[in-house]
Amino acid sequence: MACPPLAVGLIGYPVEHSLSPAFQQAAFDALGIPARYELWPTPPESLDERFRSLRAPGVLGANVTVPHKRAAFARVDHVAGRARRAGAVNTVVNRGGTLYGDNTDVPGFLAPLRERGVPLADLAVVVLGAGGAARGILVALGEVGCRQVTVANRTAERAHELAVEFGVVAAPLDQRLAPHLARADLLVNATSVGWDGASLPLDAALLDALPATALVYDLTYHDTPLLQAARRRGLETIDGLGMLVHQGAESFRLWTGREPPLEVMWRVALAARQARERSTH
Ligand code: ATR
C-alpha cells in the first residue's frame, strides 16, 4: 500500500493570498519528495490545536505567518537563537514529535543582498518600521555587523525601544531623518505600507537625501510606490520576492535536509506573483 504523502503547511489568518504553496510544492515535486504543502488558516482560538497537530508522524512542519509569528514562539519546544532574538518564529520543524522553531526571514533578507555582492559589513542602513518584520531585519543586520544602523518609525516610542534592545540609533520618520539618509548605503522598508500600491512609508521627497549609489529594499513582494519613487530618482531597488523565496528555501532545507531547488522555486514564485497581479488588476 502506498504511504500517505507527508504534510507541511502555512499557519496564518488569513493565508489565501500566499505565494508559498505554489513554489514550495514545486520544490517538493522537483526533488520527488512525496509531500503536500497545504494552507492551514488558523484563527487565534485554534492555534493550540493546530500546533498539537504538527507533532503527528507524517507532518514535516509548517511555515507561520501573520498574525501568529510571535505566538508560535511559545508553542514550540526549542527555539533557534536568531528566532529568539527576533521574537518571532516563521518555521516549525517536527522531529519525532518535538517541535523546533526557527526564523528563516533572517537569512532570507540577507540572501538577495549577498547575491548582488553588497559588502554587508561596510553598510550604513536605515530601517523603516518597528514591528515584527523590522525586528527580523535588525537581527540579520546585527549578524553581519553592519557599520551603522538607524531605525525610524511612525510611533517614535517603538523605534526607541528597538534601538535600546539592538544597540542601534533611533530617528523620527520625518525631515529629521534626512541626515541619516544622506549617509545611508541601504534603505529598507519593513513597515506594512505599500501593499495597497498607493502609499509610501515616508515623504517621497526624503529620498532625495539618499546618495546616488544607495539601494532601496522593500520587504513587500510587489513593486511598491516607494520602489517606483526610488527608481525615478535613478536609485537601484530590490523588492521582497527574493526574500520570500529565500526564506522559503531555508525552511525547505530545515524540513527535508535537502538542498532546495532555488531556480525552480524562483521561477514558480515569479509566475505566481504575475498571476496574482493579473487577477487583482
Ligand atoms: P509586522 O509584523 O509586519 O512588522 P506590525 O508589527 O503591525 O507588522 O508593524 C507594522 C509596521 O508598519 C509598524 O512599524 C507600523 O508603525 P507604528 O509602529 O507607528 O504602527 C508601520 N506602519 C503601519 N502603517 C503605517 C503608516 N500608515 N505609516 C507609517 N508606518 C506605518
Image (tube, grey):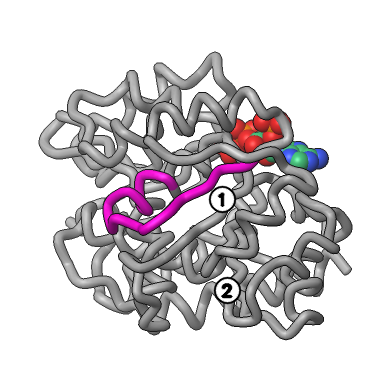
Q: Is residue 276 visible?
A: no
Question: Callout 1: few (<14), some (14-19), or many (20+) C-alpha neighbours within 10 Å?
Answer: many
**Residue 159: where, in percent of width, then height?**
58, 32
68 or 13, nearer to the observer: 68
The answer to which of marks 2 and 1 sits earlier in the sequence is 1
User: Are the two marked residues, 2 and 1, in contact with CB atoms closer than 8 angstroms?
Assistant: no
Q: Pointer 2: residues within 10 angstroms few (<14), some, or many (20+)? A: many
Question: In terms of depth relative to the viewer, which is nearer, 239 or 30?
Answer: 239
Q: Secondary structure at mark 1?
A: strand
**Horizontal and vertical percent position of residue 5:** 29, 54
**Secondary structure under badge 2?**
strand
Marks 2 and 1, how far apart at CA: 12 Å
Q: Residue at x 32, y 21 (%)?
A: 75
Image spot of residue 214 (x, y percent) = 58, 74
Q: Name the amino acid, label 1.
A: Val
Q: Amino acid at mark 2?
A: Leu
238 on left or right of 264: right
For image coordinates 29% across by 31% down, the residue present is 84
Residue nearest the observer in this picture, 180 or 275:
180
Which of these two is toward me, 183 or 215?
A: 183
Residue named by callout 2: 215
* Residue 277 in picture, x, y percent from top left: 77, 70
Residue 204's tag is none
Q: Which residue is labeled 1 in the image?
A: 127
Q: What residue span does the magenta drawing correspond to?
A: 138-152
- Residue appearing at x 63%, y 75% in the figure: 211
Quadrant for the N terminus in the image: bottom left
Residue at the spot x=78%, y=74% of the render? 228
